[in-house]
Amino acid sequence: MSLTVVANRVPIRKTDDGWKTSVGGLTTALLPVLEEQGGVWVGMGEDPDLPECQQYPEDDPDFLVRRVPLSDEELDNYYYGMANRVLWPVSHYLIQHLELRERFIDTYRSVNERFAKAVLDESPDDPDEIIWIQDYHLMLAPRHIRDARPDAVIGHFWHIPWPAMEVFRILPWSRELLRGMLGCDLIGFHVDEYVDNFIESAEVLLGADVTENTVTLDGHTTRVEAHPIGIEVDRFKKMAATEEVKEKADKLRNRLGTDNIVIGIDRLDYTKGILSRLTAFEQFLEENPDYHGKVSFYQIATPSRTKVESYQQLKREVDEAVGRINGQFARDNWVPVNYRYRTYTQFELCAFYRAADAALITPLRDGMNVVTQEFITATQNGALILSELTGAAYLLPEAIQVNPYDQGGLADAIKVALEMPDEERRSRLKGLKSTVEKLDVHKWAQHFLDSFDR
Ligand code: GDG
């Protein structure tokens, strides 16, 4: 078998020492397969220095990186437009952020066609070849590939939620998008809820024949399965146990100087529930004066999609909320909310995970949320407060589960987490760690690829 990966981005970036692979869950999972079996990675590649075809590694190549060049205007309409202003909000049930524009779908169509052409140009027409497409940027590409190469083996993994059929059908192009996806042989989602939503969408909107996990349209059958993604457990475990991380964690605790530390780590994205988390923390402080001076909330928000207006607006709202809470409650040396709008290294993130008594992970919707798994792996005795509207919640019943829209419930959960008896923390964490070990990202990739044989 050889593999063609098709993703929005390419997995390499330029450094002073030449091209290097980038760090990230997907890259980590797929590169070992490409290195071992060879293949191609097709992606948009924003770096203008990247040639259209780049062998990697340069001196002794394992695989080819094929760049699909996009103009600024195409990037605006396909990526910032259709992907981030249409498919992202609708899939997370946040339709107040939806912006429907003809130019978004027009460009999305032509860019998807271009990706499909790059795949057809570079990947061998061979029955052992697997073409594995990633995520919501590329819903139409499978159909183009199927039309040109009826015997191709095509898979797709969808990293975000698939919404309820009644929400998906809001999109004027819902049927066309579904038909595009049904060019695949196999489609993976994180959990059964999204599988069921997808199958219902195909049945109701296209009149496809469906079973519990297949969809047949125009004589072609697509299998639809849950494949929950994991993290690189061993690497995270080792990193969390290093002296460097321990020292950083101790330093952070000393610097904050409070008995209790609660953390939040997210891209600054309206799906992550950062604002409602902050107001819940504010309510917790109002209701629990005993905790004044004794608890710090440390929120890291990594800059993301900064060109999109709703992300700029969210940044202003979060800044305001942090200012309001600190303005009302800070005293002497105590700052209740420590907010950092910047990117950290994974080492630094690991130190935050280790330093925390509790993590507040409360997205309004999230396909999986792997920060949860990173926290569980790195922490020694932390408590986890987790939104029930994440894919992770289905897999992690030992977390303190909350409805992120319930501010009072969230405020109560913070108290429960901080006051949880040691023994209960340990026992919950044992269950959480055991699940995360099984979800390892290498197993995820292998399991998805093996599924083509079944
Ligand atoms: C999508 C789906 C699904 C964050 N800040 C920094 C940083 N991060 C890393 C985290 C984590 C990753 O980014 C975020 O992953 P999530 O899963 O939480 O969320 P999305 O980015 O929305 O990912 C999601 C995922 O795809 C996988 O299928 O779980 O549901 O939305 O790994 O650690 N990493 C570094 N510096 C930062 O400042 N190095």
Image (spheres, helix red, strand yellow):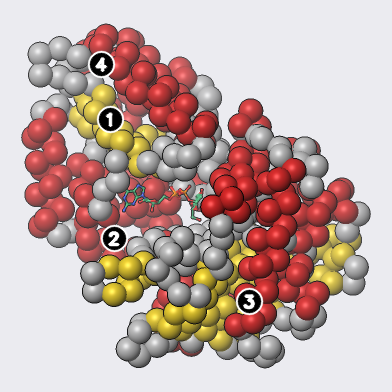
User: Is ligand 1 within 8 Å of the beta carbon of the residue shown at mark 1?
Assistant: no
Q: Earlier in the sequence, mark 4 or mark 3?
A: 3
Disc 2 target residue: 236
Question: Could you classify mark 2 by the number of other residues whose Cα lies within 10 Å: few (under 14), some (14-19), or many (20 or more)?
Answer: some
Q: Earlier in the sequence, mark 4 or mark 1?
A: 4
Disc 1 target residue: 339
**In which image quadrant can residue 277 be found?**
top left
Q: Secondary structure at mark 4?
A: helix
Disc 3 target residue: 119
- Mark 1 and mark 2: span between their CA atoms? 24 Å
Residue 190 visible in the picture: no
Of circles 3 and 1, which is in front?
3
Residue occupying the point 45% across, 17% down = 408
Residue occupying the point 42% across, 86% down = 62
Q: Mark 4: which amino acid?
A: Asn
Q: Mark 1: which amino acid?
A: Tyr
